[in-house]
């Protein structure tokens, strides 16, 4: 009589998560609004960093006048509330971004950390460790800014609260952030400032 094979116990790996497709101009409403809601942390991974103008906050006179402010103003308000702010990027930020940052020296002293790795090409936004954007949009006006139709990039991404993806993306981001990838990087000799040397 043949022996019956024992089957290994199976674990149900299904989990509930929301996933929303973000396309083109929806990047502005979805991402900028989510960034403004951060209460603990905001991690941004992007190849390019450019000055990005966004609508002034609801309820302000600037908003009533239809004015736009720098995203750095939004980050400054988050920093004042104690939100941890990280931007991991590849290229040198645009001249306009650097000029705006120079007008806000307290932002760098008070919470915004930026690290540059020329190999970064990922585009992610992680809000409070609970919400994740993963897609194609850089931190630029054309990528997710309030540019008009015909001037905005064609972009696709997803917003999700999936715990597994959040854990994996945050672990990958942090590994790059702390320089754990630097030792084996074949571009290290060309790197302006290896992250493991910070």
Image (cartoon, grey):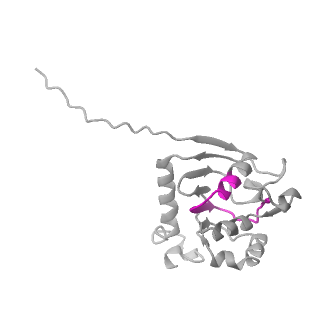
Which is more toward the observer, 54 or 165?
54
Which is more toward the observer, 71 or 158?
71
At 63% from the left and 76% from the top, the residue drawn is 110
Does 17 appear above or below 34? above
Q: Residue 28: horizontal and vertical position, in percent? A: 74, 51
Q: Residue 163: horizontal and vertical position, in percent? A: 48, 48
| Furthest residue toward left | 1
Indicate left or right for 20 with 183 as reference.
right
Membership of 187 in magenta stretch: no
Which is more toward the observer, 119 or 101?
101
| Furthest residue toward front | 59
Indicate left or right for 97 with 19 as reference.
right
Kindly indicate the quadrant of the structure image that contains residue 1: top left
Membership of 33 in magenta stretch: yes
Q: Residue 160: horizontal and vertical position, in percent? A: 57, 46
Which is more toward the observer, 180 or 83?
83
At 67% from the left and 68% from the top, the residue drawn is 91
Does 98 appear above or below 18? below
Indicate left or right for 160 with 28 as reference.
left
Q: Residue 167: horizontal and vertical position, in percent? A: 47, 54
Stretch in magenta: 31-56
At 14% from the left and 26% from the top, the residue drawn is 3
């Amino acid at each position: 009589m043949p022996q019956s094979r024992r089957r290994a116990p199976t674990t149900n790996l299904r989990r509930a998560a929301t996933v929303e497709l973000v396309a083109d101009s929806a990047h502005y409403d979805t991402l900028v609004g989510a960034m403004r809601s951060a209460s603990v942390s905001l991690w941004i991974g992007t190849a390019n960093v450019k000055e990005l103008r966004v609508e002034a906050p609801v309820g302000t006179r600037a908003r009533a006048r239809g004015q736009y402010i720098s995203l750095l103003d939004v980050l400054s308000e988050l920093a004042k509330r104690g939100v941890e702010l990280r931007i991991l990027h590849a290229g040198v930020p645009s001249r306009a971004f650097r000029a705006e940052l120079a007008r806000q020296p307290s932002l760098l002293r008070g919470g915004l950390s930026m690290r540059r790795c020329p190999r970064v090409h990922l585009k992610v936004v992680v809000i409070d460790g609970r919400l994740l954007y993963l897609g194609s949009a850089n931190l630029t006006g054309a990528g997710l800014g309030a540019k008009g139709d015909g001037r905005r990039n064609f972009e696709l991404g997803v917003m999700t609260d999936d715990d597994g993806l959040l854990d994996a993306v945050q672990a990958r981001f942090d590994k790059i952030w702390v320089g754990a990838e630097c030792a084996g990087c074949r571009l290290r000799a060309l790197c302006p400032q290896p992250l493991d040397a910070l």
